[in-house]
Image: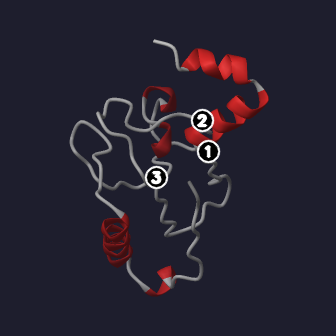
Amino acid sequence: PGMAIVEQFPVDELTELQNKRVCHIFSQLIGDLIPQDINNTLLYDVKNKNVADPLKVRKSITNLAQPFHTDGGWLTKTARVIGLFCISNAVHGGGSEMTSLVKAYEELRRLYPQEAAILRKP
């Protein structure tokens, strides 16, 4: 597990469509794209769309904070890589946090070996 940050990409010099194409190309270079919803959407915008009832839609189209979660819980194979391509910074918010379940388990095993062993039982 790890993270890479590519900075200073000239997003301001490209149109929104060009930036989306660049994001798609970057994504394909890193790995296979996995559908994000039941419509097989591979890449989508994360932006506040000012929906009428933000509690009844995905938080990624609202300005609400989102707790830690697992994307694609319905998929048979988890993603190896997660990518975020920022075309324009949010005035407020926009922070992202990621963690590795593997790293969390390793830490649990280091600090609480007996409890971690329970997780490996059928």
Crowdedness near tag 3: few (<14), some (14–19) or many (≥20) residues, C-alpha within 10 Å? some
Q: Vertically, is 68 above or below 30?
A: above
Q: How many marks?
A: 3
- 49 with respect to 27 (left or right): right
Q: Position of residue 43 (x, y in %)?
A: 33, 56
The one of 47 and 82 positioned closer to us in this rendering:
82
Q: Element under label 3?
A: loop
Q: In 3D space, how far apart are the residues under numbered discs 3 and 2 (Cα atoms)?
A: 16 Å
Q: Vertically, is 32 above or below 21?
A: above
Front tag of 1 and 3: 1
- Residue shown at 45%/33% (left/top)? 52
Evaluate if marks 3 and 2 touch, with contact meaning CB atoms under 8 Å apart: no
Kindly identify the amino acid type of the residue bearing the numbered disc 1.
Thr
Question: Which residue has dot 2 on it?
Answer: 68
Evaluate if marks 2 and 1 touch, with contact meaning CB atoms under 8 Å apart: yes
Q: Quadrant of residue 31?
A: bottom left
**Mark carried by residue 46:** 3
Question: Which residue has dot 1 on it?
Answer: 99
- 82 with respect to 97 (left or right): left
Q: Element under label 1?
A: loop
